[in-house]
Amino acid sequence: MAIVVDKDRKREKIALSCKELILKEGISSISVASLAKEAGIGKGTFYEYFESKDALIFELVNILMQEHNLKKEQKLNGCNSAREKIKEFYSFFYSKDDCELRRLYKEFLSIALISQDEKMIEFKSECFNFYFNWINTLIEDAIKSGELLSVAKDLIKGMYALGEGMFIQSVTTKDIVNLEQDLNKCVDDIFDLVEIPRNIKKEKE
Amino acid sequence: MAIVVDKDRKREKIALSCKELILKEGISSISVASLAKEAGIGKGTFYEYFESKDALIFELVNILMQEHNLKKEQKLNGCNSAREKIKEFYSFFYSKDDCELRRLYKEFLSIALISQDEKMIEFKSECFNFYFNWINTLIEDAIKSGELLSVAKDLIKGMYALGEGMFIQSVTTKDIVNLEQDLNKCVDDIFDLVEIPRNIKKEKE
Amino acid sequence: MAIVVDKDRKREKIALSCKELILKEGISSISVASLAKEAGIGKGTFYEYFESKDALIFELVNILMQEHNLKKEQKLNGCNSAREKIKEFYSFFYSKDDCELRRLYKEFLSIALISQDEKMIEFKSECFNFYFNWINTLIEDAIKSGELLSVAKDLIKGMYALGEGMFIQSVTTKDIVNLEQDLNKCVDDIFDLVEIPRNIKKEKE
Amino acid sequence: MAIVVDKDRKREKIALSCKELILKEGISSISVASLAKEAGIGKGTFYEYFESKDALIFELVNILMQEHNLKKEQKLNGCNSAREKIKEFYSFFYSKDDCELRRLYKEFLSIALISQDEKMIEFKSECFNFYFNWINTLIEDAIKSGELLSVAKDLIKGMYALGEGMFIQSVTTKDIVNLEQDLNKCVDDIFDLVEIPRNIKKEKE
DNA sequence: CATGAATGAGTGTTCATTCAT
DNA sequence: TATGAATGAACACTCATTCAT
């Protein structure tokens, strides 16, 4: 038998075993010592699998985001309209279920804002693209199916930015008391402008 | 008699003399020692004027923001339409002139995202309110003057969030290559939906 | 009129105005800044009257001890037997009334234990002598009046040390639960050995 | 495999190597940096073995006290009477041999007097109990063997406190010129009161 | 392949004292 | 005489990373 362990597998295993601790304590206040202890390995071993503390954080955010995306995809499939889908998409920013991941995302954003690290930017870009393409497809499909005016296409980038912006404002100020309400109101207001009313749709037909 | 010093003035002077260094090095990686040295004072003196390192950051952001707001107000007065005003408002996020302040704002956001500090939140809230009210008034005036449909009012919060969100995305990813273009495109797209065309306005008359 | 103020008087006045603060905060955790503020003078002025922070502490402990001694003297005059007097004397170590001064004394002892400062030792010696002479006189009088066996004289130094020792033990351990009880028990036990019983006294007569 | 180190042994080794420096400089005026340097280790390593500066002091006092107790026990076994044993017990406070440990004990007392630290109090309590029980047993045995009057039992707590009190007074004042003499005088005076004279003992028989 | 002992530069903050006015 | 602005040495403590085993 090969003594050689699948490094990637173990890497992932280590990252996942730190999940609870990181979600509980937050990124910045956690030490490599406690991460290694939580994973049941030595500090030296930690550095065999991750080149730095930040590397594990990225790995974990990555894993958790992918987990989250799978669940979200299923939920989105259950939505009937683009309006609902966007709302469902935004729910990450306020839902109780995503509370812990959201906290991680906040800390991740905080790092990303001032990091010059190439990998960090690369990773954030991948996230951005992933979600942007999602919304993009979603809107385009809705236009094709006659649910939305074709002008809606122009609002995609704005749509995406709006959610993140409002989230950040809710987190850094005390003025957005009810993010869920405010976000949904925004979505409704915009969709009211670009949605093709049912009766008109029928007229078209 | 004792040396009389205008504490507020000196406080401001110290903060401003640290500006260059902070813009160059970034906030988090800078030490109180180097800040004091940069300001030409002792570390002890630093703490005579600021209760903590973060306090200096606030002071600086505060000073520069107020400077910026005065200039911005004048520029806004030179704009003829709400559309132009919003664009002018957003220009903070990309204009060369505001490059330095933007840099500072980024660092400030990074801190604010994970800070639990009451004063920090208070300060960010004040900033939020200041700009929000600005946009609010701007839009309401435009509705009153028949420039915008009354539905535009619903988009105010979103408008504000959109700018901040897109800015953050441009900073943390490499996907928003031209923030100026993207932002302006967004504004145009939205205003095309809520602006009352000139000919209609005339018809109204 | 002489502008020259009576330095000693002002010195005392400053010390006394810091009394409350010192009793409340303790010696070690207090700064010159807060002392000066409490006294309503500048920090520079403070050093016009006291050569160091410790100097004020000594001055104050001195003043307060003398205050305390006057009160104690009156109380002692109200006692009928040497046994009672010693008990009254020891009551400093546990009575509620002396709680604050006792705290100060503790801190003072802590400093005195490791201080090489001549003045400090001088001061503590004066305290020592003051109390020692008190007890000495007290016991000698009691022997003269036939209240105590002459052997009691040999126990004076021990008597004095015993109180301080038991006090320190009560403060530094959790084993002396009831200092009042333990101290009084000790006094009683010793006096039972050296007190001349009334009936014997009468026989003598 | 990792380097295996007997942590307890190294802890002890570090503490002992700081002994000289502490005795020379005193505890309070010594920095962790200099302690680490003295022990030939890094500052970080220091904190691997001690959770705080005070912790090293405890360790050292602890080690030296235990060493001291073993020696003392042997010496006490060589004493024939309770009177001699108490004197031997007190000799810690003045003997040349214990000079160093006494110095440390002084510093330890100084800390203990104002410390609120649970562990500190716990440790001092253990010391207290250890010695108190020693004296207790010693006296009780002497009563059983007919050496002392049973009333001697009442004086145990006082006996113990007396030594510590007189020691502190000798350290903090210049009035106890010869502690050895004074302490022994005290012991003799008390024992003269509670010792059963030989001839009486014989009568009893 | 795994370890964890060792590290030391770096941190923010305090405060008794000085001295120019 | 009175001041309080200025100081800077000193402090305990942290932690990502290395490397000998």
Image: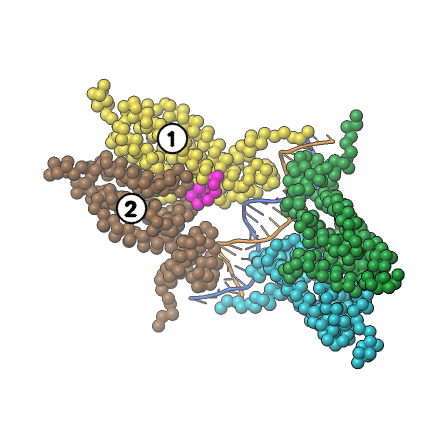
Chain colours: A green, B cyan, C brown, D yellow, E orange, F blue
Left or right: where B135 falls relative to C137: right
Q: Is residue D45 left or right of residue F17?
A: left
Q: Exactly how many numbered labels are in the figure?
A: 2
Q: How far apart are marks 1 and 2 (CA)?
A: 28 Å
> Residue A156 occupies which quadrant of the picture?
bottom right
Q: Which of the image's four quarters has the N terminus of chain A?
A: top right
**Residue A176, quarter of the rendered image:** bottom right
State left or right for residue B169 relative to residue D88.
right
Amino acid under disc 1? Asn
Figure check: D159 above or below D172: above
Judging depth in this view, the residue of A101 and B172 nearest the camera is A101
> Do we see residue B75 in this rendering?
no
Q: Is residue D119 magenta?
A: yes
Label at residue D133: 1
Dot 1, crowdedness within 10 Å: few (<14), some or many (≥20)?
few
Magenta range is D110-120
- Residue at 31% x, 46% y: name it: C91
